[in-house]
Amino acid sequence: MLRIAFLHFHMLKLCFFIFLIYWVKSDEEEKCPEFTDLNIGNALSGTELQVQLLLYTRENPNCSERLIEHNVAASGYLDTSKKIVFVIHGFRPTGSPPAWLGDMKELLLSSEDINLIIVDWNRGATTVNYIIAVENCRKVAEILKNYIDQMLVDGASLDTIYMIGVSLGAHIAGFVGQKYNGKVGRITGLDPAGPSFTQQPPEERLDRTDAQFIDVIHSDTDALGFKKPLGTIDFYPNGGMDQPGCPKTVFSGLQYFKCDHQRSVFLFLASLKRRCNIITYPCDSYLDYKRGKCVDCEAFQPMSCPVLGYYADRWKKMLIPKSSPTKAYFDTSDQDPFCMYNYLLEITTWNKGTRRGFIKVKITDYAGNTVESEMNSEASTFRQYKKVKILTGFYQDLDKISKISLTFSTKTLIGPKHKLRILQMRLKSLNNPERLQLCRYDFVLMENTELTFKPIPCPEKGT
């Protein structure tokens, strides 16, 4: 009997303990609302649109405050005198929260004292039917306008509103901007969705007139992204497709479909980490950029060439109407922080006949560190006394170069080996244009034979 009573007592204690854990957990969940976490089952059955706005500030960086739709003024953390940044996700075919969301929150708050609002429309974006998610975009924009209207009444300014939209989220940001006649301060579009939007007129998608400043990163223009320019300035990493480090075949599974598309987000996050500035080059085409035709940043002084990401708005092209967008191209490495250290190699030859081929570059510093460039994707044409510009890049930056190695190749497997007679070679750092330019004169490159030499400082211009 005593044993039964003892067991009952311990069962009661266990039940109370479980209840206490559940009550505390429920209380924590109530105190710290989180992004909606769904699964593939929800995607298969479909979800009704629900939108919640989760506010984070430096005062509550780890515990969000859910804004009340019709009483935003009741917020305990929203400070309308500060910048208000909205982050809007896109299509969620599996229902899980975006993998990048936590980093986005932490990095934005550490970069600037802002009101950060995560727009959670996972219920409405989670579906296997992409068209339903597309149709919900306009509805989400209408709901966001309701919130923003209340913020404006409470003292906020459209100038300080900044919307970061990913994929479908970029078009949602555009729809919101339309509702305010383009007076919203800034919109960043991270690989705006292409399917269902590519053939649409400006009023049915993100457009450069939707905000005072719009920067767009296009990383998957041949599949899930949007190819044509949409902003004040449009960035095309690696030409806008086939990002380095991403799978090349369908056998890699889900990553094959989303890696290029998501790269825009990770490039933006890299800009917040400030490990290096990703410098970009305004140009008419990726091919012209690769041929070294658009790498003179001095042409844009005093602003120089634009940098990618969060700080892109520090570069604004002067006296350019919104109808004339700027396209900027650049190459990246295959992993975070994605920086490529670019050099311009200028070569003047004195061969009587024309030569076509590639030049591979290695540089070595005084500590013995060596980095090798990728071969230029386009063959260069070398003509007598004509200067040829070759853009080359390295994954690592070497400050003081002691040796340069060049290899000339025509990539032909048969036939005689060729020589390239060099009248002058000049190597210039594009990331650090203040560095000494390095030269070498009168030497011969034998095909497929590496030549290593010590460069000398180039003479100053005009001397």
Image (cartoon, rainbow, N blue to C red):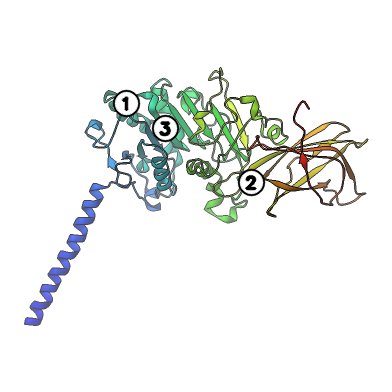
Residue at mark 3 to residue at mark 1: CA–CA distance: 14 Å
Q: Residues within 10 Å of mark 3 (few under 14, many from 20)?
A: many
Instruction: Nearest to the eye among marks 2 and 3: give it.
Output: 2
Q: Circle 3 is placed at which residue position?
A: 163
**Percent position of residue 414, x then y:** 89, 51
Indicate which disc residue 198 carries: none
Q: In the image, is 87 to the left or to the right of 377?
A: left
Q: Residue placed at 56% from the left, 23% from the top?
A: 317
* Disc with the residue nearer the chain's start (1 vs 2): 1
Q: Circle 2 is placed at which residue position?
A: 397
Q: Circle 1 is placed at which residue position?
A: 156
Give the quarter of the figure containing the C terminus: top right
Question: Which one is in front, 101 or 402?
Answer: 402
Question: Which one is in front, 375 or 47?
Answer: 375
Q: In the image, is 275 to the left or to the right of 139?
A: right
Q: Residues within 10 Å of mark 2 (few under 14, many from 20)?
A: some
**Percent position of residue 316, x then y:** 53, 25
* Disc with the residue nearer the chain's start (3 vs 1): 1
**Percent position of residue 377, x then y:** 73, 42
Q: Residue placed at 72% from the left, 37% from the top?
A: 437
Above or below residue 57? Residue 321 is above
Q: In the image, is 237 to the left or to the right of 364?
A: left
Give the quarter of the figure containing the N terminus: bottom left
Is residue 374 at all visible to an observer of this figure? no
Above or below residue 157? Residue 268 is below
Of helix, strand and loop, which one carries label 3?
strand
Instruction: Nearest to the eye among marks 3 and 1: give it.
Output: 1
Instruction: Nearest to the eye among marks 1 and 2: give it.
Output: 2
